[in-house]
Image: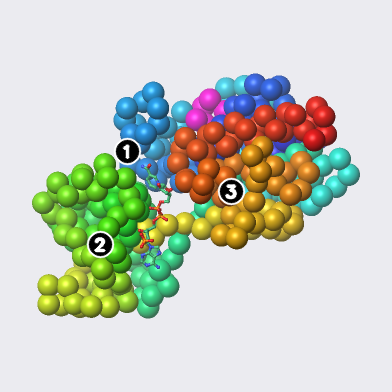
Amino acid sequence: MFDVVIIGLGCAGYTAAVYCARYKLKVYLVGAEEGGMGNTAAEVGNWPGIIDIRGPDLMENFKNHALSFGDSVTYKISRVKQIEKITGGFSVEIEGAEKIEAKTIIFATGSNKRHLGVEGETEFSGKGVTYCATCDAFFYKNKDVAVIGGGDSAVEGAAIAAQVARKVYLIHRKNTFRAEPFWVDRVKEKKNVEFVLERNVKKIVGTTKVTGVELDQPHNGSRTIPVDGVFIEIGSNPAVDLPKQLGCALDPLGFLAVDSAQRTNIAGVFGAGDLTSASNHFAQFTTAAGEATVAANSVFNFLQSGK
Ligand code: NDP
C-alpha cells in the first residue's frame, strides 16, 4: 500500500510529491496530463527567484524535481477512473493500470476551462475556436484573431497573440480588467490590439472554419468582427469530479472545501491547488505550491498520529 496517492501533474501535484518524498513517504503520483494549467503560461514572471521563464519549462523543472527521489515516487501519466474507501485507506482505479491502494489522497486536479455557451462554439471547436490563446496563437501568424475575457489568461493571451497575429481583438464584457496591470499595460503598448469593451459575443460564425464573431452591440458600426481564430479565455471551473465521487464537501462556489491544513471533510483526503477553496480562490503557481506544501505536511502528520 502506498502512503499517499497524489492526483494531478501540475504545480500542486509536483510540489506535493517533492515534499512527500522528502518526508520519506511512498508516493504514487498520477495525472492525465503533464504540466497542467502551468503549461499554458507563455511567460511566468511571478515565480520568485526566476525573473522570467516559460510555463512549460517551469513545469518540466517541477517534474524533474518530483522524479529525482528514485523509487520513492511512482509516476504514471493516466486518468484516475474511480476511488473507493477501503479499510485503512483508499482503492484507486487507474486507466490502463492495475488498481492501487493508498493510505491517503491529495487531490491536485486543478481546473477545466470554462465554455462560453454560444452558438457556433461547439461546431467550430478545433476549427478556429480554442481555449488557450498562449498555446495556440502561433498557428495564427499574420491572421486576425479574437480573445474573449478580461482576466490574466485573456490579457496575457492577447499580448502573446499580438506578437504573431496581424490583428488581435480583445473582447471583454466590462471596461475594466481584473488582469494584472502588468499585462494590461503590455497589451496597451501593442499597436495591433484593438479593445472591444462592454460587448458580449453572441455567436461564432463560419463556414468550414471560423470566419468571425457576432457581438450583442455594434463595435465601430458593425456587429460582426471578421476573424480567423477565437480564443475563449473566460476562466476555469474547479476539477472536482473525483472528490465529489468520494463524498468530499464543496464550498458555496463549487471548489473542494479544505481547512487551513488542506484537509477535506473526509479523514485522509487532502486538496491543493486551483480546485480548492483555499488561498482566497487565487489561482497562482505560488499559492498552488504553498497549498501543496501544507497538504504534504498534513499527510505526514496524519500518517503519524491519525489526525
Ligand atoms: P478569471 O476568472 O480570472 O477571469 C475570467 C474573465 O472572463 C473575467 O474577466 C470575466 O469577466 C470573464 N468572463 C467570465 N465569464 C464570462 C462570460 N460568460 N462571458 C464573457 N466573459 C466572461 O480567469 P483567468 O483564466 O483569466 O485566470 C484564472 C486564474 O489564473 C486567476 O487567478 C489568474 O490570476 C490566474 N492566472 C495567472 C496568470 C499569471 O500569473 N501569469 C496567467 C493566467 C491566469 P468579469 O471580469 O466581468 O468577471
Residue 85 place in picture, x, y as percent: 82, 50
As drawn, the label of residue 175 is 2
Residue topped by disc 3: 276
21 lies above or below 165: above
- Asked whether the residues under the numbered discs 3 and 1 touch, taking CB atoms below 8 Å apart as contact, a structural biologist would say no
As drawn, the label of residue 27 is none
As drawn, the label of residue 43 is 1
180 inside magenta stretch:
no
Give the residue type that dot 1 points to.
Glu
Quadrant of the image occupied by residue 244: bottom right
Under circle 3, the secondary element is: loop
18 lies above or below 141: above
Nearer the observer, 263 or 41: 263
Q: Depth-wise, is mark 3 or mark 1 nearer the camera?
A: 3
How far apart are the two marked residues, 2 and 3, measured between alpha carbons?
29 Å
Under circle 1, the secondary element is: loop
Disc 3 residue crowd, few under 14, some 14–19, many 20+, Cα 10 Å: many
Kindly tell me whether residue 133 is visible in this rendering: no
**Nearer-N-terminus badge (2/1):** 1
Disc 2 residue crowd, few under 14, some 14–19, many 20+, Cα 10 Å: few
Quadrant of the snapshot with the C terminus: top right
Q: Left or right: where does residue 208 sit relative to residue 186?
A: right
Under circle 2, the secondary element is: loop
- Magenta stretch bounds: 62-66
Task: Point out the quarter of the image occupied by ligand 1.
Answer: bottom left
Residue 11 place in picture, x, y as percent: 51, 37
Q: Left or right: where does residue 130 sit relative to residue 137?
A: right
- In percent of the image, x 70 and y 39: which residue is there? 5
Disc 1 residue crowd, few under 14, some 14–19, many 20+, Cα 10 Å: some
Confirm or reject: label 1 Cβ below 8 Å from ligand 1.
yes
